[in-house]
Image: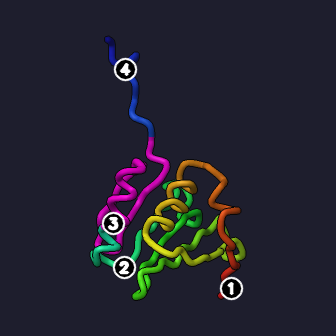
Amino acid sequence: MSPEHQDTPAEPVLRAVSETGTVALDPSAEELLGLLVLVDGGEGNHLVLARVDDAQTYVQAARNGDGRYLVEHRDGGPDRHFATVADDVGEAYRLMAEWSSGDDGWRTRVTWEQITF
């Protein structure tokens, strides 16, 4: 096949970054779960999943000492920053995976409270 007909790799849409510096571009559901399992096991305290083209649009999960997770999402400016508490790593994963896939179930399955600074 000639070079002009070869598929060019798509630019990544999402970037996952752990507190320990692990980076995954457009992580699969399995990769996202694996990164959260590492956080749950004590490798860092949080994981951020952000749009590559807009660092102000993201979802992140931070492990609390009691095993629950503070999950935050931001859709642009600071007036669009919300948080909820997930009971465990599985629930934090479901929220992050739904957000990353475009499934809007994450918006209504839990109660989100606006964060003000």
Q: Nearer the viewer, mark 3 or mark 4?
A: 3
Q: How far apart are the alpha carbons under marks 2 and 3?
A: 11 Å
Asked if labels 2 and 1 touch by Cβ distance under 8 angstroms, the answer is no
What segment carries the magenta color? 11-37
> On screen, 44 above or below 51?
below
Q: Which residue is located at x 41 percent, y 60 percent?
A: 16
Residue 29 magenta? yes
Which numbered disc flags the more N-terminal residue, 1 or 2? 2
Mark 1: amino acid: Thr
Q: Whole-Å distance between the Cαs marked 1 and 3?
A: 29 Å
Say which quadrant the N terminus sits in. top left
SS assignment at label 2: loop
Is disc 2 in contact with disc 3, using a CB cutoff of under 8 Å?
no
Q: Which residue is mark 1?
A: 116
Marks 4 and 1, the one that precedes in the sequence = 4
Which x, y percent locates residue 10? Answer: 44, 37
Residue under label 4, please give it: 6
**Which badge, 2 or 4, is on the more N-terminal residue?**
4
Q: Which residue is mark 3?
A: 37
Q: Can you say whether 89 is above or below 29 in the image?
A: below
Please name which of the two marks, 1 or 3, marks the residue nearer to the observer.
3
- Residue type, mark 3 in image: Val
Which residue occupies the foreground of this view, 101 or 18?
A: 101
Residue type highlighted by circle 4: Gln
What residue is shown at x 43% (from left), y 57% (from top)? 15
Determine which of the numbered discs, if any, sits on residue 45 in the image. Answer: 2
Amino acid under disc 2: Asn
Numbered disc 3: secondary structure: helix
> Reading the chain from its start, which is encountered first: label 1 or label 3?
3
Report if the CB atoms under discs 1 and 3 are less than 8 Å apart: no
Residues under labels 4 and 1: Cα distance?
Answer: 48 Å
